[in-house]
């Protein structure tokens, strides 16, 4: 099996510069049906690996992973679009065009903008304008501002054809309002954005896009209850609205409605399994329910694809700590400190974990190191005081607790009353 996989990857890379690559790759897949393990997760794993490589900027490996995913599912236009986008990054324009054209065969017009970008990169202005016009007349049309600020079209913007195109009235009144709202949002002028949307919603109360957009502004503003209400209104009208469940899930999360958040993130991940931020957010929602095992599982899943994600590893350690699994917490914090030995937060985390395991000498050492790096942390002074008292150094421990209290650490007072008075 290992030899076959190696040979397969070698063949894929050898054929990479040949348009016939995809047909041959699929043939290999069918021939290998009796050799490769039957796993319903195999396609998803390759897709996820490809998405992770894109995030990491390793586009050659992304192409490999998406190619393997396509072997098992050649009817998903998004796989061709994602592979095509990665091919553009490594300047394989012809292969990218082939992928985007295949995506269009599967779902008409879905990759017109990508084809416009591809031809713009290769300086074929006529074809670039042709596909850009098709995109602007399709259901997949992006906002005007997004297209005009796309650096791929910089050269096109000095042509008469570009100027002529944008003289036309291409966008609806609702889309123009949305563009104005986005402008206000970028400036953090949320009240103006909401006032504008209130007027539009009053004119067209059943438009799910307007309700969804207002929900996003409420979310940015921190008005989570209003955001949830608008997202729910939008989803009741159109359950397929892009990012609907992920945005409402985030609003639920911010509002502390963790079970509802998990339900929405579950739905969002069915549509966007390659969005790794959703796994992080779902982990936070599980943690909000004190479902530590589920939260840790989410973060461990992320680290399968992002081995050096110190934040995910640190959060795992925090969840292990809260679940009172101090041994695994220490393993996480040890790894973080190995990679980043000058981080006071990591020393604090490991120090308080050592405190829980009654290894006071190590706790004192780590907490002291944390305070060398961030001396203004009242909580760390409190932990250091507790560790010193537990180790028998009451005088210095009480001094540390009093310092923590003076710095605003109100929790330190309880330990002062218990141990120092």
Image: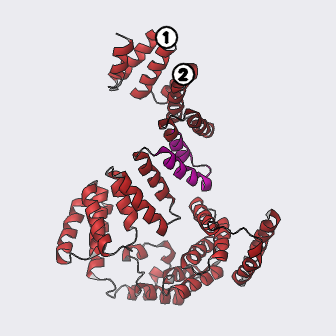
Q: Which residue is mark 2?
A: 358
Report if residue 320 is visible in the image.
yes
**Position of residue 413 measured from the top left corner of the image (x, y, whole percent):** 33, 20
Residue 376 seen in the current view: no
| Residue at the image point whose x is 41% and y is 28% from the top | 379
Q: Is residue 339 above or below residue 194?
A: above
- What stretch of residues is rendered in magenta? 291-317
Mark 1 sits on what residue? 393
Q: Residue at x 53, y 21 (%)?
A: 364
Q: Which mark is residue 96?
A: none
- Number of the front mark, 1 or 2: 2
Q: Is residue 292 magenta?
A: yes
Out of 72 and 199, give the one closest to the viewer. 72
- On the image, the x and y values in percent for residue 70 come to 64, 76
Q: Secondary structure at mark 1?
A: loop
Q: Residues within 10 Å of mark 1 (few under 14, many from 20)?
A: few
400 to 215, vertically: above or below: above
Residue 219 position (above or below residue 397): below
């Amino acid at each position: 099996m290992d030899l076959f996989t190696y040979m397969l990857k070698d063949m894929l890379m050898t054929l990479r510069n040949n348009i016939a690559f995809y047909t041959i790759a699929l043939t290999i897949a069918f021939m290998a049906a009796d050799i490769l393990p039957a796993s319903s997760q195999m396609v998803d794993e390759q897709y996820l690996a490809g998405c992770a490589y894109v995030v990491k900027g390793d586009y050659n490996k992304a192409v490999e992973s998406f190619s393997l995913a396509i072997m098992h599912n050649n009817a998903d236009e998004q796989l061709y679009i994602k592979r095509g986008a990665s091919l553009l990054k490594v300047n394989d324009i012809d292969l990218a065009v082939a992928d985007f054209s295949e995506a269009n065969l599967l779902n008409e017009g879905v990759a017109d903008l990508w084809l416009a970008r591809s031809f713009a990169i290769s300086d074929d202005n006529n074809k670039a304008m042709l596909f850009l016009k098709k995109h602007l007349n399709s259901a997949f049309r992006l906002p005007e501002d997004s297209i005009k600020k796309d650096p791929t079209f910089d050269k096109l913007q000095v042509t008469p054809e570009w100027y002529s195109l944008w003289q036309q009235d291409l966008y609806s009144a609702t889309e123009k309002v949305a563009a104005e709202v986005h402008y206000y949002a970028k400036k953090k002028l949320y009240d103006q954005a909401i006032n504008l949307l209130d007027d539009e919603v009053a004119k067209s109360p059943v438009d799910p896009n307007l309700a969804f957009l207002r929900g996003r502004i409420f979310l940015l503003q921190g008005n989570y209850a209003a955001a949830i209400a608008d997202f729910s209104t939008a989803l009741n009208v159109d359950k397929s609205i892009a990012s609907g469940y992920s945005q409402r899930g985030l609003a639920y999360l911010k509002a502390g409605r963790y079970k509802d958040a998990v339900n929405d993130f579950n739905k969002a991940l069915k549509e966007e399994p390659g969005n790794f931020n959703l796994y992080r957010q779902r982990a936070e929602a599980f943690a909000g329910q004190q479902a530590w095992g589920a939260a840790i599982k989410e973060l461990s899943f992320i680290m399968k694809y992002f081995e050096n994600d110190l934040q995910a590893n640190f959060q795992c350690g925090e969840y292990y700590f809260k679940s009172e699994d101090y041994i695994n917490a220490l393993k996480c914090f040890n790894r973080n400190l190995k990679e980043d030995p000058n981080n006071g937060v990591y020393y604090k985390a490991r120090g308080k974990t050592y405190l829980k395991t009654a290894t006071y000498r190590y706790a004192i050492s780590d907490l002291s190191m944390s305070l060398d790096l961030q001396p203004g942390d009242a909580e760390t002074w409190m932990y250091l005081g507790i560790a010193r008292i537990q180790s028998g150094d009451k005088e210095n421990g009480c001094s540390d607790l009093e310092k923590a209290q003076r710095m605003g650490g109100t929790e330190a007072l309880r330990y002062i009353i218990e141990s120092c008075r």
